[in-house]
Image: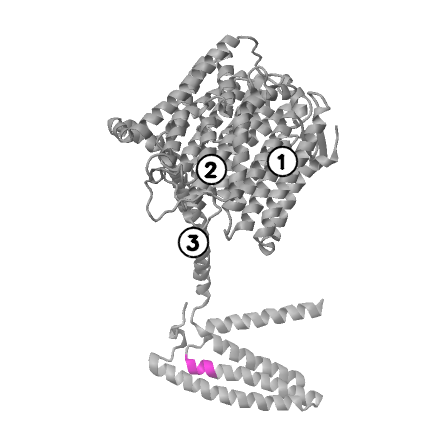
Amino acid sequence: MEDAMLRLILLFPLAGFLFNAFLGKRAGERVVSWVGPASIFFSFATGVYFMSQLAGLGEHGYIRDVIFTWIASGEVSIPFSIVFDHLSGWMVLVVTGVGFLIHVYSIGYMHGDKGYYRYFAYLNLFVFMMLVLVLGSNLLLMFLGWEGVGLCSYLLIGFWFTEEERARAGMKAFIVNRIGDLGFILGIATLLWGSAVVSHPTVEFSQLQAVVPRLPEWVVLAATLLLFVGATGKSAQIPLYVWLPDAMAGPTPVSALIHAATMVTAGVYMVARMNFAYSAAPLAMDVVAGVGVATAFFAATMGLVATDIKKVLAYSTVSQLGYMFVGVGVGAYAGGMFHLTTHAFFKALLFLGAGSVIHGMSGEQDIRKMGGLKDKMPWTYRVFLIEGLALAGIPPFAGFFSKDEILFKAFASGHKLIWAVGIAAAFMTAFYTFRLIFLVFYNTPRYDESVHPHESPPVMIIPMAILAVLSFIGGFVLGFPHHSLIEAFMEGVFRHGVEIHGASGLEMGLMFLSTIVAVAGWAVAYRMYVVDTTLPEKIAQRFKAAYALLFNRYWVDEIYDTLFVKTYLGISDGIMRYIVDDVIIEGFLNTAARTSLGTGRQLRKLQTGDVQAYGFAMLAGVLLVLAYIVWRWAT
Amino acid sequence: MFGELIILSAVLFAVGAVGFLTRRNAFVVLMSLELMLNAANVVFVAASKQWGGPEGLASVLIVIAIAAAEAAVALAALLALFRVVGTEKIDEWRALRG
């Protein structure tokens, strides 16, 4: 179905961005506080309207809006068109819904900041770009959004750019993503080339679906792997995850929206969108699942010892994204999308909760300097506990159902090793989540007497409460095993996913097992951080090497720095010094100098110092002129 | 009459030019220069007599005046140079050689 109204979803955030960017400073904080969230809310409402329209169109139904022809060159014609189907529509609701709540929360969090209007302008622009990414009907439009959200991420990480460390974190995110984006663009090029060979050049998802089965297997494999390189950058997977922990330098609501709920899930969405291609390349699927589970495991180990409240959550996000890739990698696309959704709820909430703690603690982020906040910030504590239970995978909270869905599908589709590593990571997830909660909210306070923790204003608490409700009910409402709403909803899009029938005894057993694992994580954390608080220190002493390895994050940043950054800088420096400087700049100067010197050396011979020689030259000149005049006169 | 005067002038000029280019004695070179100037004067006078205009005669007076001034300055300069360098041989005055 065609509907030109669909573009309204994009236009509301765009209008919000333009208003806040150009008039926001003059309009003042009050107006910006209305315009910013309202533009996202209208977009959300439009999304809900189209969702109801979609319901009447059947499982393969979609709504399309071709806005204009974007690129037309020879045989290639790429429209700027958006498609609202069961997958992209779902993402629109997640992005605008969670986005709206975070916008509202930001009113309280950013209150009084002198870049207030700039903050909301970036945030609106981000939502616009994210919607372009999600709704784009072709890979190139998706790439436009992909780059756009990267830009906003950079702008918002370095939002407080007067502090060098934050500005650097922004640059790091941008540059690391650039590496992934190269893969993405090569992937697009591969598909464009491949489709041109077998039929006509196209990057439209709907047309690629017909083209991919006709392509040679290696072309599909190359394209999917290259696109996945892009996903490892944007979605912070091994080996390009290093930017996400540093990205925590941005304002905390930004971490919630961009670096937990929406942008970092773009890679998962891309794999889900391209499911027809990934399913045609089993090796690429295995790579996706393998990288996913490795990331889930390694990021979780680093989360065990992190001491910054936001860094713990950052490693947790990297780890949970790994689970999503396991989901889409074993063919459980709906499972991956399910975990993406519940993760958007509870991880956004965790960040908002962390923001509330940081806000109340006057900017303190070190969990070693917190403790006992349970009574000082009762509401923050309650939502934090709910989100913690959801992340740790304790039933019946959302994370339990979605994580279990992925692990069950991995096990049932024969990826037993992936399942085992996933379960181990789940144990660590439960452990670090409760470690965080116990360190922040329990025991006696460890902060200075000068800090007076206080509860956050209602404008921050209410969005958190809504997300807390979603984190609680989101799991069993959306994805109750065998009655999964989300799976049924997206059935038309994921025709190539794994089908698993029956075996519910096995499923119950695995569910029971992962519940035990989660509870065990809680128990260990309880023992170490509530019952006997000297235990962590003792363990760290006992396993010094392992602790140092984790605490220094496997020295990955240092290794990258030596291997790539220093090498790259060395090579550029060499080129600068020995080619640009020596050959080009000095070469130019030396040549110019040598030429004028040489010319001078030749010309100086004319100046003999002999007056009579000059006289001769003059006379000869006069005679030549005369001869010329006579010759002209004579002829 | 006019023709002969022009030839005279040409001869005078040629003598002056050759003297200027070939003689080594700086003072003789200077005298050759005067000779060329006077060759020009002869043409002026001849032309004035031939076509009866006053401009030629006026020009001659200006040339004589400038030549007198020039000769005074040039002689003084030559004398000063002669004292410094110690020779009147003009081909040995090559301090400005590049």
Q: In terms of secondary structure, where does tag 2 sit?
A: helix
Q: Quadrant of residue A528?
A: top left
A247, A542: nearer the viewer: A542
The stretch in magenta equals B25-30
> Which residue position holds label 3?
A590
The CA span between labels 2 and 3 is 73 Å
Same subunit under labels 1 and 3? yes
The percent position of residue B87, horizontal first and vertical second, equals: 35, 79
Chain under callout 2: A
In front here: A405 or A562?
A: A405
Q: Residue at x 56, y 46 (%)?
A: A120
Question: Which residue is under mark 2?
Answer: A379
Q: Is residue A444 visible?
A: yes
Q: How would you rate the neighbour count of disc 3 (Cα within 10 Å): few for under 14, some for 14-19, many for 20 or more?
A: few
Residue at the location (62% across, 53% down)? Answer: A23
Which residue is depicted at the point 41% across and 17% down? A516
Label 1 CA crowd tier, 10 Å (few <14, some 14–19, many 20+): many
Which is more N-terminal, label 3 or label 1? 1
Q: How is the image coloured?
A: one colour
Amino acid type at image mark 2:
Trp
Subunit ID for the residue under disc 1? A
Label the magenta part by its dominant secondary structure.
helix
Disc 1: which residue: A132
Q: Are marks 1 and 3 in contact (CB under 8 Å)?
A: no
User: Could you tell me the amino acid type at mark 1?
Assistant: Val
Counting residues from the start of the chain, the first of labels 1 and 2 encountered is 1
Is residue B26 one of those drawn in magenta?
yes
Kindly report which numbered mark, 2 or 3, lies closer to the viewer in this rendering: 2
Residue type at mark 3 is Asn
Chain letter belonging to callout 3: A
Q: CA distance from mark 1 to mark 2?
A: 36 Å
